[in-house]
Amino acid sequence: MVEITIRKRPRTEAVVTQHKFLKKTARGKVIKVLRERYLRDDVACGIQGCPVCDMPAEDVLPVAGDKEHPMFPNGHFILPDTNVFLSQMDLIESSLFTPPIILLQTVIEEVRHRSLPLYNRLKALTKMDDKRVWVFYNEYRSETAIVREEDETPNDRNDRGIRSATSWYSAHITLAHPPVRGRVSEKVPTIVLLTEDAANREKAERSGISAISVRNYVNKMKNATQLLDLLSATGTNELEPTRASSGGRAALYSDYLSTSTLLAGIKSGILHQGHFNANQYNYLEGSVSVAAFDKSVLLVGRENMNRAVDGDVVVVEIFDEKEWRASTNEVVDQDATLKNDDAEASGDDGEELDTNSLVDEESKLVRNGAKTVGTERQPTGRIVGIIKRNWRAYVCHIDSTSLSTATSTSLALQTVFATPVSRLLPRIRLRTRQAPILLGQKILVTIDRWDAHSRYPEGHFVRALGKAETKEAEQESLLLEFDVPYRPFGKAILDCLPKEGDQWVVPLKQDVSKEWRDREDLRELIICSIDPPNCQDIDDALHARQLPNGNIEAGVHIADVSHFVLPDNPMDSEAASRGTTVYLVDKRIDMLPSLLGTNLCSLRPFVERLAFSAIWEMTPTAEIVNVRFTKSVIASKAAFTYAEAQTRKDDPNLNDPLTQSIRLLNTLALKLKEKRMAAGALNLASPEVKIHLDSSESSEPIDVEQKELHETNSLVEEFMLLANISVARKIQDTFPQTAVLRRHLPPPKANFEKLQDILQKRKGMTLDVSSSGTLAASLDKCVDPAEPAFNTLVRIMATRCMLSAEYFCSGSVGRETFGHYGLASPIYTHFTSPIRRYADVLAHRQLAASIGYTPLHATLHSKSHVERILDVVNRRHRMAQMAGRASVEFYVGLALKGRGEREKKDGQGHVRESAFVIRTFRNGLGVFVSKLGIEGLVMFKRDTQFDPDNYTITVPGAGGDVHIAVFDKIVVDIEVEKDKNTQRGKINMTLVEPVDSRAL
Amino acid sequence: MGSRVEILNEGGFRSDGRRQFELRDMTIDLSQRGIADGSALITHGLTQVLVSVFGPREAKMRSQTIHDRANINVEVSVAAFSTGERRKRSRGDKRILEIASTIKSTFEPVVQTNLYPRSQIDVFVQVLQQDGGVLQACINGTTLALINSGIPMLDFVCAVTGGVHSTSPMLDLTLLEENDIPNVTVAMMPKTGKIALVTMETRLHVDRFKEIFRLVSDAGKVIHGEMKSAVLSRSTSLVTAMGSGPRTRGGDLEERDVDDQMNNY
């Protein structure tokens, strides 16, 4: 039994413990709030073995502090104030920054009020294994709790609180080091208040606390050069007063409106709020999709984009309708246009000439756009405010031309440009002492601010990822760019694994063992798994057998991950935050520790494994008679690859039960597929290619080819779909409020307009998008007999018009929006891959509860909790897809480079492939090379005749003008070239047929 | 998006500095008030309730008399200034009537009404300040006021509120916590361990209920100790004042102090 006590509070304390404030509600009413707090003396100080606080001797702050810093030879602890965390989080997070940190509750709360993302990083920091952070709840400790005085701002109050906590610690620490008679008295470590606020420092010094600014502190550290770069630009203000005081220079951008004006404007409908999307082809253009217009709002030119960065939530003002215009349809490359811009000067009033010519050039580009006003005018406007910045750390290269000295020994502070890998982002200005060393490396940079008088945002260096084009650097940059958590699993997480480790086996079947409780023994069944080659995480297996009554029993057995991953433990929360396993070409970032993924939960052959089975009885025409779900123990009899299963099925000489079972499954799958197609399921396509690696060690790609599909692929797919649908029905029945489901909303008709128009004009084909069935039918008709790949191309383009599928909680949306458009199923979920998707783990838990195996954990009863988890999982899922694609792209690039070099030796010199035109620009073509699964741009230096209505451009050729239109087949030379300045690899395409574009 | 205040932070502290199983400060004043036969002013943290008991006396209305036992009449009024937002509640307010009837049905089996047939016991409950746990304060106050007025009861009735934040249970919720997490109020009789009232207006998972119910019942015993010592010290001081109580030197002084303290109100 826990000890229940009454917290007594002397009446005299009321002044300190009661806290009265006035609050304005959303309706504008002012109410008075009275709160109390209980001050206590048992809030621990966290110093190892402290005799007063009764601290244990491990896992806390070391007793002597940190003795590495030369300014504090007696050892020290640092106690940073709020601003340090708000502006210098990268520094604190760095693994080089090791002093023990005392984190005050006041500071945590202030950070929480100012910025939730930073608060979350701070929370993660306190849990990091290699950091020594102790959270001290100073507001609850009687000596350190303070009350806001009259005429004191909340800020001043917090600062005073931080100071009083510091002095308490200084006094307290002498108690932890009691003088022992007969021994030289120990040196007492110093508590160092870390603050950027000069006034605060002064006050602290006056009351005898040692205080220091972050910069001064870091300056004296051992690895100062690396750490100084991590300091954010806001911290440099006081060092360079000239910069701050030069406010007189001309602002390049208009100021943002105040928040209240923005909110009022949005409410009254004058202004509109939305996400800013940069245009990847033209850096001077962006768009914002807002609710008020069907088409997204176009923003043209730097001034109108007004310092927005891709992903920000912005507020736009719409121009008069006569100023509306169409997108320029032009490719404008930032690197090419701005290559002469000087990092030091841009934005400063120093070199007027340069800047002016640049502005001229840009405005010419913008005006060019105005000329080609087509019929497709879009609402046009400008950004007047930012609701929320979505800045994160970006992977960049340093632009070599922006360096003033390139001697690698130079440690001079210089301003350079960092060019982000993503084309959607502007260049970032960066001040660093390590510029020559960082050249040619991939580095991580965060944006700190973007002032109205600075052309580019200012940022600071976070860390180097390694040399560009090395596998490690590229891989890590990919993971960072797509925000994939890739740290190794911590101790707390690994502790949740079974103690037996890889010795774990299913215990003998006895009544006493908990594994066997309510589990069916399916070890005798002839079960096999079919997966891609080299698959290690086998999460599904199948079986089928003839029943005496003429029906067929088919079963899908899924690894019972929820048996090992229990709700609400560290492993579960880690898996929830990872959301999914990420597959890169040469690496897999697991959602669960590999012991589970590739061993205990992997349904390997000839081993007993725990499974969750869905078993149907079906008629020979694949009608479901009934379905049941059960936890089970299985022993798979074989693990096939798709190809192996295929040959086995097709071999007439084989008639063993395993082969028969595959044949049985196959006949059922064919019928299931037929039914699904009849119901209007879509057969979509995405460019999928396979990378051949030389050997597993070198992972040098040799070649790229398109993925081959076997009949058995579709066999597995059909049964997985069936299992998912059956499970979705079951959990939705049992938990109508919180079932974890997956849906695919029907795409808005407007998405297809452009594709329909192109198809109509170029090929005379129509696309009926009124339902998924009609779309599937009309896609089938889009066939060009001369060009078998054409149909795939149309399917790829149609797929891009659609929305992406998402997880949702059944209680949060209307019943009529549950449907899965692509699969034409009224209800769907993910159940079949719990090793690599977290949503499946939740579905497993809900299914287990719905068959009465275990009670449902309390968190899965809460709609808001499920929604919150699924939001994360959806985002991770999207990011994982993009990361996977980017990884393939990188390897295709490598393979192309290798092939190009080989062919150069053979004397040909180029990789030549046929491609389809998928988009036309005023000065270029967007092409798709189906054989390699890549998209690229062909640019023309000279202007061409561009007919946007017919999607045609006319280029002069040797034998007269040549028309090139969308869907035309052309031949391109592909080469990978490196940008000389930034070392950023880039796929370059030139047109070979029908005309040679090198001359253009 | 929930409130910006953390209900239970990672150090195990609640928003007001208590830990999970700590009850708020509790003060009890049993001094004489006006012509009431017994009264009690009780505070749980910032929640304050004044209960006055009149009776047993002849019923005002004939229709309300019951021939074999006394009728308990509970009237609750909530002061307009008791919440942050000023709000007048009329007597007929459904919410208030519900509290009143809950109190009435809680005490009917505990008070030995059969000793006073055809009479009436009036309980007037005034809520002066609210900060969570109003019902709990009303019930505890009523128990003390009834005892103070000398009405025979089978046992104390001690009420405590408990809630569950995610999976961690906590006791004696403030208004902030009450608004945020599922909670249950339990009134128990410490001597027999019987439960006089369980009421819950939010949804709580059935697996959690057992745990929280046990915990709240245990907390009732702690409250009982507090109430009992308040009653004892009040009685001792009265007895001393009449000059017939047991006299021990130290105790005398101490008790007088307590009494003085109470007169200060």
Image (tube, rainbow, N blue to C red):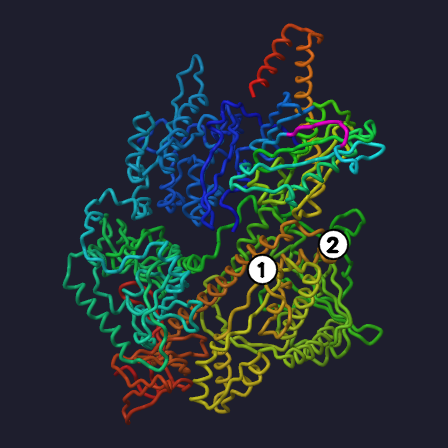
User: Can you tell which mark lies on residue A283?
Assistant: none
Quadrant location of the C terminus of chain A in the rendered image = bottom left
Pick the front one: A133 or A503: A133
Residue at image mark 1: A836
Quarter of the image for residue A125 reads: top left
Quarter of the image for residue A666 reads: bottom right
From the top left corner, tell me how far across and down residue A867 is, in percent. Answer: 57, 57
Residue shown at the point (51%, 35%) measured from the top left: A35
Q: Do the residues bearing badges 1 and 2 touch, measured as CB atoms within 8 Å?
A: no
The residues colored magenta run B51-59
Q: Amino acid at mark 2?
A: Tyr
Q: Do the residues at pointers 1 and 2 share their chain?
A: yes
Residue shown at the point (62%, 33%) measured from the top left: B126
From the top left corner, tell me how far across and down residue A633 is, in percent. Answer: 74, 58
Q: Secondary structure at mark 1?
A: loop
From the top left corner, tell me how far across and down residue A682 is, in percent. Answer: 58, 78
Q: Amino acid at mark 1?
A: Arg
Q: Secondary structure at mark 2?
A: loop
Q: Is residue A325 left or right of residue A530?
A: left
Q: Is residue A909 visible?
A: no
Pick the front one: B141 or B16: B141
Residue shown at the point (82%, 35%) measured from the top left: B66
The disc numbered 1 marks a residue on which chain? A
Q: Is residue B56 left or right of residue A494?
A: right
User: Where A32 falls versus A714 (above or below)?
Assistant: above
Residue at image mark 2: A853
Q: Nearer the viewer, mark 1 or mark 2?
A: 2
Pick the front one: A512 or A729: A729
